[in-house]
Amino acid sequence: MVYDLIVVGGGLAGMTAALYALRAGKHVLVIEKSGFGGQITHSPKVENYPGTLSMSGNELADKTLEQILAQGAEIELEEVEKIETAEDSPVKTVLTKEGSRFEAYTIVLATGVKHRMLGLPGENELVGDGISFCAVCDGDFYTGQTVCVAGGGNSALQEAILLAEKCKEVIMLQDLPFFTGEQKLQDVLFSRENVRSYTQVGVTGLKTNENGFCGVEITHTDSPEKKTEVIPCDGLFVAIGLIPENDAFAGLAQLDERGYFDADERCLTGTPGVYVAGDCRSKNVRQLTTAVADGATAAIAACRYLNEMQA
């Protein structure tokens, strides 16, 4: 069987691509390696998605999966290892680590990203329940409270600026002797009276009590005795980078210097019939709405390619 479209990745971008192609009458397979929904499943509440007053990220992911299944999508829980193309055939072959082989005329790569984590015990369990990655998504939940931000680059500074508008106090935690983000962002952030910072500190522990997350342990790396200190706070925003997982597809779509697919808002690659969508693509804004926009754009382009091929 040759599918019209195979979507690699079951986040919101990938599922939106599947939805648009299905509604255009195409035969679609979605391959996801772990769980459907992607990064949005880490959000306990989604309140910035049009038409949705409030729901959890898991609920949104489940509803979207239910929607594409109702439209006829097929799904496989496997990890794509390689995609092969041939100059004399429009068919692309998708190979998985589990040993499966699938074929399609078009591919949408919606592989997403993963947040770089601190690597601390108990960290994964606190994601969405004390640990967050997105001030736009989760900042309102900490209005009038104290939060820490781990990181010192542009992303960390931008997150902290948004949080400083809502929170009682924002505490910056940077492992280097200085902040690496743009000076203009530093000027804006550190002009706020409710912002203070530590440099040359590592986040070395997460504190909880009977009510859940309650603070972080930091280690002063510039002190000979490596002095530790506990900072009470209501939430921790981790902004130490994102990690794309696109290397396996570098032969199909060019990567930029950070490993993201080097494609603009048209979601095109250098390979006919192969498109990219979502956070895996090089872009300035990574939000739920931009992910689903990419999914729609990529699917429409794929359907156009299919229609022209079959004409």
Image: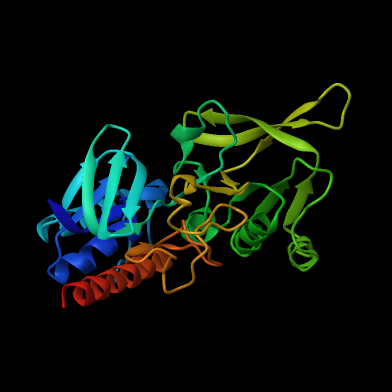
Query: Residue 79 placed where, x, y %?
Result: 33, 39
Which residue is drawn at the image coordinates 53% and 53% (left, top)?
142
**Total number of numbered discs in the rendering:** 0
Q: Is residue 175 above or below residue 61?
A: above
Which residue is drawn at the image coordinates 46% and 52% (left, top)?
251
Which residue is drawn at the image coordinates 76% and 36% (left, top)?
201
Query: Residue 167 placed where, x, y %?
Result: 61, 57
* Residue 170 seen from this side: yes
Query: Residue 28 placed where, x, y %?
Result: 18, 57
Which residue is drawn at the image coordinates 41% and 46% (left, top)?
42
* Residue 50 seen from this side: no
Query: Residue 9 placed where, x, y %?
Result: 33, 50
Q: Is residue 220 above or below residue 95?
A: above
> In the drawing, does residue 172 fall left or right of residue 97?
right
Looking at the picture, tell me which residue is in the foreground, 175 or 216.
Answer: 175
Quadrant for residue 184, please give it.
Answer: bottom right
Q: Is residue 130 above or below residue 143?
A: above
Looking at the picture, tell me which residue is in the foreground, 53 or 96.
Answer: 96
